[in-house]
């Protein structure tokens, strides 16, 4: 339990607070509408569906306020580097921004469903009351009107439309109904296109449908303007519903029972979402400004395994290790921006990205570059960023475990390059004294573009008598029989047949229990940062191992798990 608190305590606390606020808002507004005297007559028409419609609306307001904040990446990067969030544990929460974004989205989806179902029932009951299907009081309340048609209770004002068609007519001819339909359809498309299988295989579908959030928020702002839910207003003389509810035929005829007056509540949703909407508009304006800034190509290299390396130069661009940028290529799409971790070091006078063919956009970019004449500049490229990630904190730990899977090695290329420069310049600020690096790949060609860097580091560490500073292990998780035979023939060679490194390649997957036990044994009093850029399945494994091998004694080894999210 203590180990779990070390790694997940603050995350759990934040989630409990978030869920507590949701529950509080739901319960508070449920009883506000279910017990409030001003809604007595409204409840007579609608029953408990009134409270079931309004309580989720309050929760929706709160979560729609939150949903944009985790994707305001410039704001998060600012907070990461500010004094307010300088603590390691708090920065870890900022790195879980997309997980929180998804969680809030699930809550919005759930509350939207409850809100919509309750209001569909409300429209049906409004219609039946208007047509005299229920008791005399319901009919009297539904027939209330005045010269300006403003103090009514039942929003269905006409019976000219066929009874069966009235609910549909009402939904598509009122502000609340029409915006509700638009909001719901936009939300359904956004959520369904965000499923992992669609996002991975059809990123363009995910990208474009996600921008329906503009329609969603526009509809949200105007949704409450219809003022469908109405409450009783104070009159002089007052209308006492406990005395007058059974004397509806005498309303307006006796002084004790004046005709009750009703009005819709003031729209409040816009007050919840206007702040985050303004922040997000500034976020997109900043992206546009960065898009207009000139980017030139320093070097273009096609690496093995269809990996494209772009070395880019942009005036005033400054980065830290492990950060990422969004790239836009107008020749492919004016609107699509894709995130890529930078593989260069802050000490270099350019920034680079390695792009693997993993979809239509990346394949089109690689095809365009392959067709360029030698020495030509690449297609126009817009760059937004850089943005902070968990890997920025790698030098805050005395000991770091870096785990990359496939192209997920890119943030660690930046880190290892930066370490090389720091050793080269004898940087006294380097706090890290030990790094364990693990790279898992399915095919041998994937190792080739990164092996050169490891060879340089290997040689540099030996020359400086610091061979123990970097321990790296490469794992090949996919191979065939011919490759196995080739390895067996060259088994006694000084260097590895796959990478050319002195460290031999391992076959299969790491035994993580063995690796964590070894790290703990070699660093009995250290705080170890474990960094992953890879799939969610591997993240779950490493997170559990960090909890398992962390010691609650502050004097002994503790593992902190960090994962790249973008």
Image: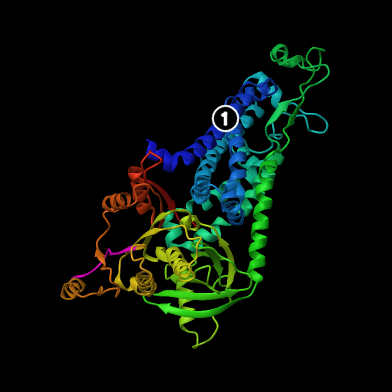
Residue 223 visible within the image: yes
Badge 1 density bin: few <14, some 14–19, many ≥20, Cα 10 Å? some
For the point 43% across and 79% down, the residue is 302
Q: Which residues are magenta?
A: 471-481
Image coordinates for residue 2, horizontal then vertical, percent: 39, 36
Q: Is residue 426 above or below residue 509?
A: below
Q: Which residue is mark 1?
A: 24
Location of the N terminus (image quadrant)? top left
Residue 354 picture quarter: bottom left
SS for callout 1: helix
Q: Is residue 457 above or below residue 117?
A: below
Image coordinates for residue 288, horizontal then vertical, percent: 65, 65
Q: Is residue 518 magenta?
A: no
Left or right: residue 407 versus residue 428 is left
Residue 439 visible within the image: no
Between 179 and 54, which is closer to the camera in this rendering? 54
Between 516 and 181, which is closer to the camera in this rendering? 516
Colour scheme in use: rainbow
Image coordinates for residue 49, horizontal then vertical, percent: 57, 29
């Amino acid at each position: 339990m203590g180990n779990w608190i070390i790694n997940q305590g603050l995350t759990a606390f934040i989630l409990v607070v978030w869920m507590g606020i949701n529950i509080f808002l739901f319960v508070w507004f449920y009883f506000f509408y279910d017990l409030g005297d001003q809604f007595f007559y409204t409840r007579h028409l609608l029953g408990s569906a009134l409270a079931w419609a309004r309580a989720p609306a309050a929760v929706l307001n709160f979560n729609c306020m939150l949903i944009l904040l985790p994707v305001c990446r410039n704001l998060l990067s600012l907070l990461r580097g500010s004094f307010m969030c300088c603590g390691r544990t708090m920065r870890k929460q900022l790195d879980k921004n997309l997980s929180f974004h998804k969680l809030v989205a699930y809550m919005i989806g759930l509350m939207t469903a409850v809100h919509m179902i309750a209001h569909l029932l409300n429209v049906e009951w409004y219609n039946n009351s208007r047509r005299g299907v229920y008791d005399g009081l319901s009919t009297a309340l539904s027939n209330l009107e005045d010269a300006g048609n403003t103090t009514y209770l039942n929003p269905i004002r006409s019976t000219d439309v066929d009874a069966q068609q009235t609910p549909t007519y009402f939904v598509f001819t009122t502000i609340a109904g029409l915006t509700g339909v638009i909001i719901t359809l936009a939300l359904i498309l956004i959520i369904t296109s965000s499923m992992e299988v669609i996002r991975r295989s059809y990123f363009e579908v995910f990208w474009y449908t996600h921008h329906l959030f503009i329609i969603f928020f526009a509809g949200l702002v105007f949704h409450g303007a219809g003022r469908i839910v109405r409450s009783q207003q104070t009159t002089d003389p007052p209308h006492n519903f406990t005395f007058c509810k059974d004397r509806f035929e005498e309303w307006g005829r006796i002084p004790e029972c004046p005709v009750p007056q009703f009005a819709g509540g003031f729209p409040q949703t816009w007050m919840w979402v206007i702040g985050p909407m303004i922040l997000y508009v500034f976020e997109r304006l900043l992206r546009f400004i960065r898009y207009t800034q000139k980017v030139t190509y320093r070097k273009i290299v096609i690496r093995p395994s269809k990996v494209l390396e772009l070395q880019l130069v942009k005036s005033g661009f400054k980065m830290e290790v492990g950060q990422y940028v969004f790239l836009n290529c107008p020749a492919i799409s004016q609107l699509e921006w894709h995130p890529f971790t930078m593989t260069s070091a802050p000490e270099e006078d350019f920034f680079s990205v390695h792009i693997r063919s993993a979809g239509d956009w990346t394949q089109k970019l690689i095809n365009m570059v392959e067709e360029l004449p030698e020495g030509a500049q690449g297609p126009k490229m817009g760059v937004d960023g850089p943005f902070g990630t968990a890997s920025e904190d790698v030098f805050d730990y005395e000991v770091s475990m870096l785990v990359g899977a496939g192209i997920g090695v890119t943030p660690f290329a930046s880190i290892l390059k930066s370490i090389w420069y720091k050793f080269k310049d004898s940087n006294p600020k380097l706090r890290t004294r030990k790094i364990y690096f693990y790279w898992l790949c399915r095919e041998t060609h994937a190792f080739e573009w990164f092996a050169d860097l490891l060879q340089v580091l290997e040689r540099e560490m030996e020359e400086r008598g610091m061979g123990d500073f970097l321990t790296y292990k490469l794992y090949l998780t996919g191979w065939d029989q011919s490759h196995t035979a080739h390895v067996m023939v060259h088994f006694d060679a000084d260097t590895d047949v796959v990478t050319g490194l002195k460290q031999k390649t391992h076959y299969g997957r790491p035994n993580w229990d063995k690796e964590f036990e070894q790290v703990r044994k070699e660093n009995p009093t250290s705080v170890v940062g474990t960094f992953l850029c890879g799939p969610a399945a591997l993240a779950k494994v490493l997170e559990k191992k960090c909890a398992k091998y962390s010691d609650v004694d502050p004097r002994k080894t503790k593992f902190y798990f960090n994962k790249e999210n973008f």
